[in-house]
Amino acid sequence: MLQLRPNCELCDRDLAADSNSARICSYECTFCADCVDTQLHNVCPNCGGGFVARPIRPKIEHRRGTSLEHQPASSKRVRSAYSNEQIAEFVNGVKDIPAEQR
Ligand SMILES: [Zn+2]
Ligand SMILES: [Zn+2]
């Protein structure tokens, strides 16, 4: 199940569970749309993969036992282990390769 992490790993801005600005890679590395578009250029700095919009877990229990209340978002903030310089260098080496060919 998706962890729905509470912040962008790069700029640390809050990303609420119902945010339309959250982006995730296949490992659930979580960033904001601004960082993905302007700094990461669709390259996850942790794995090199591309991003998709994070799905929004429903607030309402449409089906029994499934809702944000039943499976709450994570409150554990995650920050990237890499420096901005390391990230920029990594992104530059990967961004021109289409995500499906990386
Ligand atoms: Zn960000
Ligand atoms: Zn990743």
Image: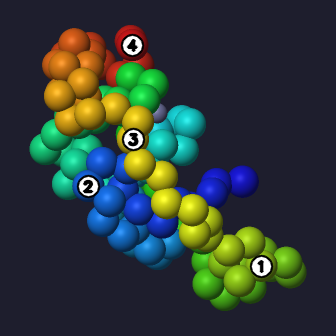
- The residue positioned 30% from the left and 65% from the top of the image is 13
Give x and y (percent) for residue 51: 39, 40
Q: CA distance from mark 4 to mark 1?
A: 37 Å
Most distant residue in the bottom direction: 60
Q: Given this view, does label 3 or label 4 mark the residue nearer the observer?
A: 3
Can you identify the residue that label 2 sits on? 11
Q: Is residue 65 left or right of residue 71?
A: right
Circle 4: is it few (<14), some (14-19), or many (20+) Cα within 10 Å?
Answer: few
Residue type at mark 2: give it: Cys
Can you identify the residue that label 3 sits on? 80
Residue type at mark 4: give it: Arg
Q: CA distance from mark 2 to mark 3?
A: 9 Å
Give x and y (percent) for residue 96: 19, 16
Residue type at mark 1: give it: His
Q: Secondary structure at mark 4?
A: loop
Q: CA distance from mark 4 to mark 2?
A: 25 Å
Q: Please say if 73 is above or below 32.
A: below
Quadrant of residue 12 in the image?
bottom left
Mark 2 or mark 1: which comes first in sequence? 2
